[in-house]
Amino acid sequence: MGDFDFGALVDDQFKGIRHGYKFGKAFNDDKLIVRPKAPVVEAGVDDNVTIKTAWETGDTVSGIVEKETKGGYEVTVAGQRAFCPFSQIDKFKKDGAEYLGRKFDFVVTEYSRDERGLNVVVSRRALIEVQAEAMKEAMLAELNEGETLNGTVTRVMDFGAFVDLSGVEGLIPAREVAWERVEDLNTVLKSGDGVTVKVMHIDREAGKISLSRKECMSRIFKRSPEDEAAAKSAAEVAEWMKENAVKNANVGSMAAVFDGLKI
C-alpha cells in the first residue's frame, strides 16, 4: 500500500462546520460534510475579524489552551477568549494536563453576541473527526484484499477484535483470531496489542473491513488433553510392541539352536 496525501480532502470537508452538529450524522451520502449556511452576525465594536472570518468561511484558527473551567477549557484565539467544551477538545478526552498550555487548531462552532459581549465556542474534535474521515476514505481506496498489514488492537469483544490500521478500523472475527478454537479472546488479545493481519474482505460502501490473524500464523493445532492422552497411550503401545519384537526375535534365534535335537 503506497503513501497518500489526504490534506486536500480535509481542507475540502471541514469548511462550514457549525455548532450543534453530531459528526456521526453530519456526512451526506458522498461522505462530505453537510455545510449549513453561517448565521449572519451583525457588526459590533468588539468584533474579532480573524475569528468572525473563520466562523463565516469554516477556516481553522490556532489557539492556546489556557486553563480548565466549568464544563470545558478557556482558549485564547487571535487575542480573544474562547470556550471549548470538554466533549470538543478531543475524540477521547485525556487528563487535563495533556492540553493545558498547548497550541492546537480549532474550528469556530459558535460566534454570537449577548449583553455580556462576544461569545466564541471552538471545537478541536470536529477537526479531528473530519481528518479521521478523510484518512479513512483515503485508506479504504488504497487497501486491497489479500494484503498483509500491521495494526493495533483497539477493542476486544465476544465476537471478535477491532484493529486500527493507521486510521481505518477493521474487525478480526472470533473464528479468524487463531487456528485453534479460542473460548475467551481476551486470553489471546488485549487493547493496545500490535498484531499482523491479512485483509480478507473490503466492503467500501459500508466502510467495513474483515481481517484474519490466523492467516498470518503457522498452522499449528494445539491438541486437547484427550488428544494428548490418546497420543501418549499410542506412543507407549508402539514402544511396547517394539520391545517385544526384539524379545521375540531373540527367542526365535535361541530356538534354532535346539532345532532337530532329540531329548
Image (cartoon, helix red, strand yellow):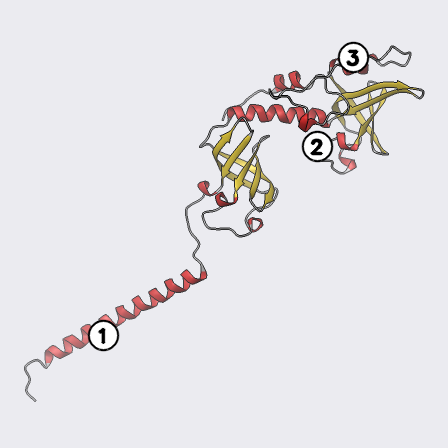
Q: What residue does disc 3 label?
A: 53
> Which amino acid does the dot numbered 2 rest on?
Lys
> Which amino acid does the dot numbered 1 rest on?
Lys
Q: Is residue 240 left or right of residue 61?
A: left
Q: What residue does disc 1 label?
A: 247
Q: Residue furthest bottom?
A: 263
- Which is more toward the observer, 94 or 24? 24
Identify the residue at horizontal 86%, vertical 11% (top origin): 42
Dot 2 crowding, Cα within 10 Å, few <14, some 14–19, many 20+: some
Q: Secondary structure at mark 1?
A: helix
Q: How far across and down, in percent of the image, does residue 232 sit?
A: 38, 65
Mark 1 or mark 3, whichever is nearer to me:
3
Q: Which mark is residue 91?
A: 2
Q: Which mark is residue 87?
A: none
Disc 2 versus disc 3: distance between alpha carbons? 25 Å
Q: Is residue 235 left or right of residue 225?
A: left
Disc 1 versus disc 3: distance between alpha carbons? 100 Å
- Which is more toward the observer, 86 or 21? 21
**Dot 2 or dot 1, earlier in sequence:** 2
